[in-house]
């Protein structure tokens, strides 16, 4: 662990890699790079990767996005020895696009940033500007470089802080308000400027100078890029600033009125009635002024509410317009005549289907009628032949109850008397039918006897 002091007196400690304690390894890493990388590609790349990752780690732990050679030499000093190849590391990182000169980084962003006069973006030595314009590849000790990876991270953090803050609904912010809001994210003003430059490059922020005040406008959620600062934005910004000033003034007057009230109470206890009356008069005067300012504050708040409502109405109207356009496109090829024609065609097809179903059903009924005649003849034949299987006519079952019998003789008499009389009518069977039935019974009996005589008989085996 060594203290880092990058241009500022900072006591922040940075965790160094384990090989920092290995003298043999660090002697190799602290040595200068070979002029030709092809001499030892592995050694060159391992040394370059070590210093590149360590520089990123140092800057991320400090929360800064800019480095220079002089500061790096101070940070990485070990046992009184400074690394000899850091200039080569910075040049290689610049060629790979990992870092960029501060002037080049700012020049890639359009808008009047040079007119700001903020920190390091303005004060540039003339010789440094000439060396940049002439394309000098050398690295001076105090020349600042922007770490691209870190400035992108810082820009995303700054945008997140704004959108999660209570002032996210304000379209414009002053630079000082933003500096206070992002103090825990951007450790210094230079870091804030670099983050704003990156956001402006991503078209998420626009910065303008109005009078002597620097104003920042962020993109709102749902917008792909920020819109330019308009007169409406400036008017709203003035009203919001007036609101804050009035609130502060009303609060201050309230405290002043309370102060006069306490002084009057103390003077009254001391018996200084005239002085207490003067304090009360001053209190009344202050309260009257506070009431006047409070009325103005309410008017400003009412105007801001109306503006907010008008913006909401504008969004609703835009949504309606988008809906009408979408509906018009969806109904582009649809007409009332076409719909009526389509309904008529559907009705015609339904009628045709009904006719087809009726025709098919009629054919099936005719075929059923043709089959019905044959079925009726077969049924008549079965009825005629089934007369032989009908049971013979039997007398009716007696309906009167049997009388109780006490003796055997009387029981027989009662049973005989209870039986029905013998029928006198003839059976409805002819002699020929009786002969046929008898022949059938005789043949059946003969078949049973033959089956019985021809079946094998198991004989008992003699005992051994």
Image (tube, grey):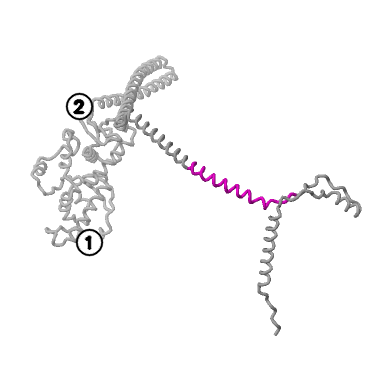
> Is 302 or 14 nearer to us in this picture?
302
Residue 240 vs 452, above or below: the answer is above
State the image coordinates of residue 230 (x, y, percent, origin top left).
Answer: 23, 27
* Quarter of the image where one finds residue 211: top left
Q: Which mark is residue 25?
A: 1
User: What are the residue bounds of the magenta stretch?
Assistant: 364-393
User: Does the rendering let one see residue 319?
Assistant: no
The mark nearer the N terminus, 1 or 2, is 1
Residue 32 vs 113, above or below: the answer is below
User: Does the rendering let one see residue 81?
Assistant: yes
Quick one: SS at disc 2? loop
Name the image quarter holding the C terminus.
Answer: bottom right
Q: Report the residue at 13% width, 49% height from top.
A: 139
> Is 437 or 455 nearer to us in this picture?
437
* Quarter of the image where one finds residue 35: bottom left
Residue 205 vs 71, above or below: the answer is above
Marks 1 and 2, Cα distance to the nearest angstrom? 58 Å
Crowding at label 2, few (<14), some or many (≥20) Cα neighbours within 10 Å?
few
Q: Which mark is residue 211?
A: 2
Quick one: SS at disc 1? helix
Q: Is residue 168 left or right of residue 437?
A: left
Q: In the image, is residue 353 part of the stretch drawn in magenta?
A: no
Name the image quarter holding the N terminus.
Answer: bottom left
Camera-nearest label, 1 or 2: 2
* Quarter of the image where one finds residue 284: top left
Q: In the image, is residue 381 part of the stretch drawn in magenta?
A: yes
């Amino acid at each position: 662990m060594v203290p880092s002091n990058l241009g500022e007196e900072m006591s922040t400690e940075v965790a160094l890699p384990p090989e920092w304690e290995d003298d043999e390894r660090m002697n190799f890493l602290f040595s200068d790079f070979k002029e030709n990388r092809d001499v030892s590609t592995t050694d060159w790349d391992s040394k370059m990767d070590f210093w590149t990752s360590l520089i990123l780690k140092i800057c991320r732990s400090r929360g800064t996005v800019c480095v220079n050679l002089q500061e790096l030499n101070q940070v990485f000093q070990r046992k009184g020895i400074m690394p000899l190849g850091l200039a080569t590391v910075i040049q290689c990182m610049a060629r790979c696009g990992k870092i960029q000169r501060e002037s080049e980084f700012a020049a890639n962003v359009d808008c009047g940033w040079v007119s700001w006069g903020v920190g390091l973006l303005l004060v540039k030595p003339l010789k440094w500007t000439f060396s940049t314009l002439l394309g000098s590849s050398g690295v001076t000790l105090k020349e600042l470089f922007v770490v691209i990876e870190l400035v992108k991270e810082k820009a995303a953090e700054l945008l997140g802080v704004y959108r999660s803050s209570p002032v996210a609904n304000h379209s414009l912010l002053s630079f000082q308000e933003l500096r206070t809001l992002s103090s825990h994210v951007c450790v210094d003003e230079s870091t804030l400027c670099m983050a704003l430059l990156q956001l402006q490059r991503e078209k998420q922020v626009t910065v303008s100078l109005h009078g002597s005040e620097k104003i920042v406008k962020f993109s709102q959620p749902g917008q792909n890029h920020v819109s330019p600062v308009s007169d409406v934005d400036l008017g709203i910004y003035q009203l919001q600033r007036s609101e804050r000033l009035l609130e502060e003034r009303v609060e201050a007057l309230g405290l002043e009125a309370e102060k006069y009230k306490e002084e009057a109470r103390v003077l009254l206890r001391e018996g200084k009635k005239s002085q207490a009356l003067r304090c009360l008069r001053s209190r009344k005067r202050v309260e009257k002024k506070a009431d006047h300012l409070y009325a103005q504050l309410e008017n400003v708040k009412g105007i801001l509410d109306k503006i907010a409502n008008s913006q909401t109405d504008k969004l609703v109207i835009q949504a309606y317009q988008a809906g009408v356009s979408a509906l018009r496109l969806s109904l582009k090829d649809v007409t009332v005549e076409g719909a009526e024609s389509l309904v008529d065609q559907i009705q015609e097809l339904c009628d045709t289907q009904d006719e087809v179903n009726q025709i098919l059903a009629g054919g099936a009924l005719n075929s059923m009628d043709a089959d019905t005649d044959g079925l009726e003849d077969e049924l008549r034949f079965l009825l005629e032949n089934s007369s032989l299987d009908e049971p013979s006519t039997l007398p009716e079952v007696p309906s009167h109850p049997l009388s109780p019998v006490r003796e055997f003789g009387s029981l027989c008499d009662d049973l005989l008397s209870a039986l029905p009389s013998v029928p006198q009518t003839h059976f409805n069977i002819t002699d020929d039918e009786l002969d046929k039935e008898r022949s059938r019974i005789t043949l059946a009996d003969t078949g049973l006897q033959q089956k019985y005589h021809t079946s094998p008989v198991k004989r008992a085996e003699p005992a051994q």
